[in-house]
Amino acid sequence: MEGGKINVLFVCGMGMGTSTMAELGVKNNLNKLNIAANVQHTSLGQMESLRSWADIIVILKNLFSEITVKEGEFIIPVVNVMDGKGIAAEIEKIVDEHFPEVKG
């Protein structure tokens, strides 16, 4: 967490189109849920450089098998990156259980 906000990292193959679209859609839905979040997107290849920053990682399901989940990490594999509401709901479940202080 950083500045009273949860850090959410979106990961896709190239770190541009897909994760950018997911980031924007989820950010709006997190605001509606009163969840304070810092949101970034990156490529699978660059993920390691931001991994320690992230409280929650959202990754395309087809890329999930290419990473090793570390103990204590919260990773959400997704199929439809355009489902901002659904992804935000998954983030909310983690927030409610592990980071309730970021909910306003």
Image (tube, rainbow, N blue to C red):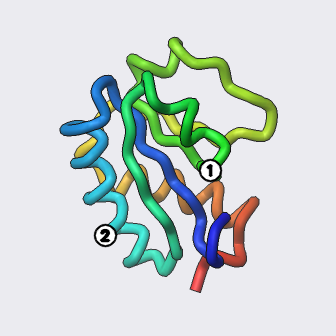
Query: Residue 100, how many percent across, how many down?
Result: 71, 72
Secondary structure under badge 2? helix
Q: Which residue is mark 2?
A: 28
Say above or below: 26 vs 13. below
Say above or below: 50 vs 13. below
Q: Quadrant of residue 45?
A: top left
Q: Between label 2 and label 1, give the one nearer the viewer.
A: 1
User: Which quarter of the figure is the C terminus placed in?
Assistant: bottom right
User: Looking at this rendering, what residue extends furthest in the top direction?
Assistant: 66
Query: How dense is the environment of label 2, judged by Cα within 10 Å: few (below 14), some, or many (20 and up)?
Result: some
Query: Residue 8, how many percent across, how many down?
Result: 51, 54
Relative placement, left or right, of 84 versus 73 is left
Query: How dense is the environment of label 1, judged by Cα within 10 Å: few (below 14), some, or many (20 and up)?
Result: some
Say above or below: 31 vs 75. below
Say which label, 2 or 1, has the lower sequence index.
Answer: 2
Q: Amino acid at mark 2?
A: Asn
Query: Residue 86, how many percent across, how many down?
Result: 38, 52
Q: Nearer the viewer, residue 16 or 86?
A: 16
Query: Residue 60, how many percent across, how many down?
Result: 39, 29
Relative placement, left or right, of 25 versus 71 is left
Q: Nearer the viewer, residue 94 or 23?
A: 23
User: Which quarter of the figure is the N terminus placed in?
Assistant: bottom right
Q: Which residue is mark 1?
A: 53
Say if mark 2 contacts mark 1, CB within 8 Å.
Answer: no
Secondary structure under badge 1? loop
User: Looking at this rendering, what residue extends furthest in the left direction?
Assistant: 17
Q: CA distance from mark 2 to mark 1?
A: 21 Å
Q: Amino acid at mark 1?
A: Trp
Q: Residue at x 57, y 30 (%)?
A: 48
Q: Residue at x 41, y 53 (%)?
A: 40
Q: Residue at x 30, y 41 (%)?
A: 19
User: Looking at this rendering, what residue extends furthest in the front direction?
Assistant: 49
